[in-house]
Image (tube, rainbow, N blue to C red):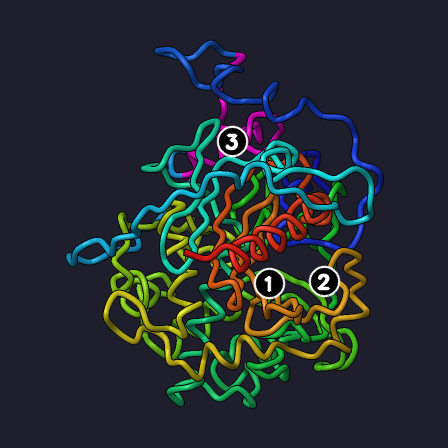
Amino acid sequence: MKTCWKSAALLALCVFPALPQAPAFPDARASDPNLLGWMAGFPPAPEKLIRHGDGSFFQFPQFRWSFSHWRELMPTANIARGSGPVARLPKSVRVGIDAIEFLPIGGGKPMTWAQSLDANYTDGIVVLHRGRIVYETYRGALAEDRHHIAFSVTKSFIGTLAAMLIHEGKLDATAPVSRYLPELKDSGFGDATVAQVLDMTSALRFTETYGSTSGDFVEYALASGFSPRPPGYRGPAHTYAYLATVPQQGEHGKAFTYRSINTDVLGWLIARVTHRPAHHVLSERIWSRIGAEDDAAIALDPGGAPFVAGGLNLRLRDLARFGEMIRLGGRFNGRQIVPAAVIDDIRRGGSKEAFIPAGYKTLPGWSYHNQWWISHNEHGAFMGRGIHGQALYIDPKAEMVIARFASHPMAGNVNLDPASLPAYHALAKHLIAKPR
């Protein structure tokens, strides 16, 4: 199916191995949404309007506003925080972090932490050290009390839930998907195991190609409702209907290939075995227990299913709270929220050999497991990653958690990693050398 809808091709829900030379864009300061006046005025001027239906919500620089206003553009469902008190994150701001220097991946001139934030179009970043906020900043359309779209960091929440259900025996990691979802029996997912879907080693004829006007990813974005549908659209009515059309290609379990549709299957599996939508399970199992400041939200597809591959909206500090809970072995806010064995399994990572063929130039020696990215570096760092710079980075040795929201003009984290990953590691070493 061909479409001229530009936004569909832009909706990359993952990081990807390589990109051509990035075109020139206005820098972070010149593209600041407050400076440009998007959606300002009552009503806004026609040239300042941003809408989902015309695709303007996912064009740069407009999306520097959109990412902090997602619930105003698409249908979402609430993820309740519960009625308990907010878990405090004490502040112990460190002077001098902005001046920390590092060498970007690929070499070149040393860069400071402060310069890296501008280079990566950072909307907000919070750094926790031993549970205390040592660094925090908000920029552009984001504020401490505003939600931001997390994109594929959402996957790490869903993968953690699925791993919990496996730990409890409600899901069998070795069982074929079709045991739980007979609707997918004749699809490429039918005889893939739950574990293979979790680790994205399922073998599917599905390519996430960004910048194309046709193909698998465009069809998926339209079916899921992420892209506005053109007049006369006759494709799958919703995400689950689309999943049933994806055929197998190759042998399951051999190689890691990042495909967002795996996470959609996980969300469906969670719903099937718990008899609750995945976002309700997220509220019950995690969000209502971590002492979040606010409810979260998740985008819905046209069939009413949560967009678990990339639709989570939340406050930045609450993302940091989730990361701190993971860092502490699943125990936070006075309770064991995720079994320690689940966290230990995530941290061990997946197959490095299966990861290699994916060709991630900025992630040598990494692996992927339970919807988390595992660095296997000397600090044992691991992370959730989302397009345009969304990140949750956990460094156990440094006792550090970094939560970041961003709106980089290029989707793939390959464009941000050179000025992000070494910055995170430099800060970790700084915190280890100068603990409090």
- Would you say residue 231 is visible in this rendering? no
Q: Do tag 2 and tag 1 residues touch (Cβ < 8 Å)? A: yes
Q: Amino acid at mark 3?
A: Gly
Gap in angstroms between the C-alphas marked 2 and 1 = 9 Å
Query: Which residue is depicted at the point 53% across and 50% down?
Result: 151
**Please, what secondary structure does the residue beneath circle 1 have?**
helix
Q: Which residues are magenta?
A: 47-70
Which numbered circle lies on residue 206? 2
Q: Amino acid at mark 1?
A: Ile
Write down the residue under mark 3.
Answer: 53
Quadrant for residue 107, please give it. top right
Quadrant for residue 189, please give it. bottom right
Q: Along the line of sight, which residue is nearer the eye, 288 or 43?
A: 288
Q: Do tag 2 and tag 3 residues touch (Cβ < 8 Å)? A: no
| Marks 2 and 1, the one that precedes in the sequence | 2
**In this view, 188 is above or below 5:** below
